[in-house]
Image (spheres, rainbow, N blue to C red):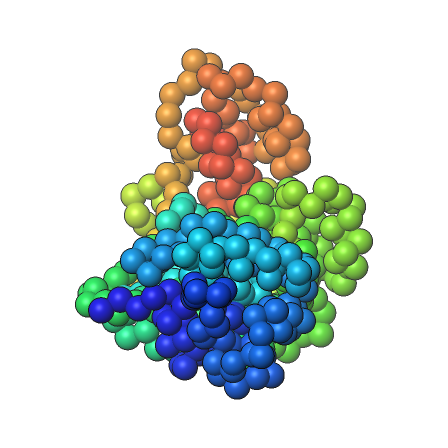
Amino acid sequence: MSFRKDRSLDELARVGNVAQFVSFAPGGSGAVQQFSRVAGYEPNHVFGANYDAIASLLASSPDGTINLRSFTPDSPRSRDFHYGIAGVEEAHAIAERLSSDGLFVIANETVDVSDGGVSGVIQGGVIEFAPDDTPRCVEKEGTASLPIAWGLSIIRRVYGFEPDIVDAGRGRVEFSIHPKPRGWKKTHTLMWEYEASDSPPASPNLTWPNRFSRHIGDKAFGLLVADVMGLPIPKTTVFARRVAPFSFGQPTGSFEVWTRTCPIEQEPGRFTTVKGWVDPFKLLAIEDPDGTVIASVLSQSAVQARFSGAAITDRDGRRVIEGARGEGDRFMLGQRAPENLPAQIVADVESTYTDAASVIGPVRFEWVHDGERVWIVQLHKGGTNSDAAMLVPGEAAEWAVFQASQGLEELRQFLAGLPDDVGVRIEGEVGLTSHFADLLRKTRRPARISRPTLETA
């Protein structure tokens, strides 16, 4: 049995929050009210007149506008749809006209899908969601896909509340999350549709960048994934453009902070990372005045670093762990060569790598060791195609030589001016895990390393 669309909303409202609505059926002398959920009124309150029902719905709508959609009982797909109506007279006239044409009508509060929240679907043990869209976002590319527990934990960390979504079991729930209270229960979670299903458990497609990671910033998303996995993440506060500031992670014992820009997608070493507090909004205005590249700024508790570095998976599936004594900023920028690390430091990083890879597969991460434990300060999913001599495999018509000592920004400009068929040969001591190497991998241009050889007497 399939319920009429407005009856389905009535059933869903019995177990959760739905967008405020009033529905009407066609009648001999005009529209006849059917179901209603309006904040401040009892479920299915019958208003004295249709005009009063629409006026009450409009007055209770957070954005001061409502939508009207029409349908027939045998086809719930919308016919005429009217969005963002602000006047009672106009909305009432449309509802009466549609009813006179023999159509059912649902009037509901307008819900802004671009308010900084997300919409998505839960089904088969997987939650998928994206910003700036309806739950149908799951039919498009780039939707974040996570195990339910992880996804709900990330939503709680970012938005500060636990989504009140009913247990879908083996069914399918469409939902949306909003910074501003919505719906007839005035909570931050709306449910749009529930469908019973016998679908078996599914596996999430956890990848990033995705639409949500771009929403809050690539680094922020990777650190959130690491945090819900239980890896040690320094206490981090995210100052995002489109989401209120939020924090996660663990205290490190230090009262200093690092300020890290957080691009929409990974941009190795391009934007500011500096020890100490910097006004995040001033930093955004200076480094990305158009708001098109940097999604947020991170303020991250400093770690009293004894050793720092990075770990990757190479082209043969082996882990590569590199680093240097002290803080790792100069190492990551290619300004310090990798050092021989103590066996215990390597063992601790390997153990952390194993913990992460056993859950999500090959990973790349930046780490800091305080002498007692490893802290993750950046996490990415996936391996690399690098090895000791070849950063990016492939052949080229010719090879351009770049001295590593010139620095990362010079390399970025150097690459921008090269023809497509020219490869790069880096001369100098550069770590496979450094931003230097990340930048070359990101360009997908053939790149090799020529390391200095030691002369013997």
Q: Can residue 150 be seen in this view?
A: no
Give the residue at x 43% y 66%. Answer: 27
Q: Position of residue 130 (x, y in %)?
A: 48, 56
* Residue 237: x %, y % from top left: 65, 67
Residue, x 74% and y 50% (percent of image)?
284
Outermost residue, bottom direction?
42
Q: How many marks overall?
A: 0
Position of residue 218 measured from the top left corner of the image (x, y, whole percent): 54, 52
Q: Quadrant of the N terminus?
A: bottom left
Q: In terms of depth relative to the viewer, which is nearer, 375 or 39?
A: 39
375 sits to left or right of 256: left
Q: Residue at x 52, y 86 (%)?
A: 42
Residue most extreme to the top: 397
Q: Compare residues 389 and 314 and report the one nearer the observer.
A: 314
142 up-or-down from 64: above or below: above
411 displayed left or right of 225: right
Name the residue nearer the viewer: 92 or 312.
92
Q: Is residue 288 above or below residue 108?
A: above
| Residue 234 coordinates in the image, percent (x, y) | 58, 70
Quadrant position of residue 52? bottom right
Q: Does residue 279 appear in this view?
A: yes
Image quadrant of residue 127?
bottom left
Residue ID at (61%, 21%) = 417
